[in-house]
Image: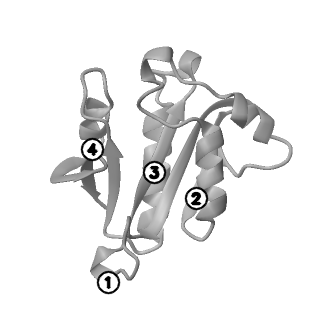
Amino acid sequence: MRLAEITTANYEAALALAVRPDQQDLVEPVTHSLAEAYVYRDRAWPRLIYDGDELVGFVMAFLDFAWGATDPRPEDLRSGLWRLAVAADAQGRGYGTFAVDQVCAMLRARGCASAYVTYEPRAGGPEPFYRKLGFAPTGELSEGQVVAVRPL
């Protein structure tokens, strides 16, 4: 498994990536994520997840970001997992865990002490997955989503 940058050679395959129908309300499509990565290019870290030459997913981290703050204080800045989408036919094979661990390793190498994630708090949602990976809810909500943190 490996993470790769999005390039002219692979972006069309990335745009075609789709999660299961029952998960479509849990994660934005890759097109939306790439638009955000363009707008927040100094804060977004988008990557494709490959198994050999097979594209199996998309992950995007956010770096030193303060959601909604126009003049953030240093203690407001956070980094973490912004998006994770594993292709419908590739789920359950460890790709999500690999991607989260790679994002956390990159954040640790940048000097971050923790990684944040937000997720929809609903049955069938990703909470058990993130808890298994060491994320714990902070008690905060961001636009109705649970905010969770993992020490690095």
Who's the residue at 52% across and 34% down the image? Answer: 85
82 lies above or below 18:
below
Please state, as top left, top right, bottom left or bottom right, where the C terminus lies in the image: bottom left
Q: Estimate the x, y position of residue 100 in percent, counting from the top left.
A: 44, 46
Judge whether residue 2 can be spotted in this image: no
In front: 20, or 103?
20
Q: Position of residue 97 (x, y in %)?
A: 43, 37
Sooner in the amino-acid sequence: mark 4 or mark 2? 2
Mark 4 and mark 3 lie on one chain; the one further toward the N terminus is 3
Residue at the spot of label 1: 73
Does dot 4 land on a helix, a strand or a loop? loop
Query: 1 or 45: nearer the eye?
Result: 45
- Residue 34 showing in the rendered view: yes
Q: Answer whether labels 2 and 3 touch (C-beta < 8 Å).
A: no
**Residue type, label 3:** Trp
Please identify the quarter of the rendering in which residue 72 is found: bottom left
| Residue, disc 4 | 144
Task: Tell me which residue sits at (53%, 24%) in the image.
Answer: 19
Between 112 and 43, which is closer to the camera in this rendering? 43
Point out the tag, 1 or 2, that comes first from the N-terminus: 2
For label 3, the residue is: 82
Residue at 58% from the left image edge and 35% from the top image edge: 29
Distance, label 2 to label 3, CA atoms, is 9 Å
Eyeballing the image, is 13 above or below 77? Answer: above
Label 3: element kind: strand
| Residue under pointer 2 | 45
Distance between mark 4 and mark 3 Cα atoms: 15 Å
Q: Amino acid at mark 1?
A: Arg
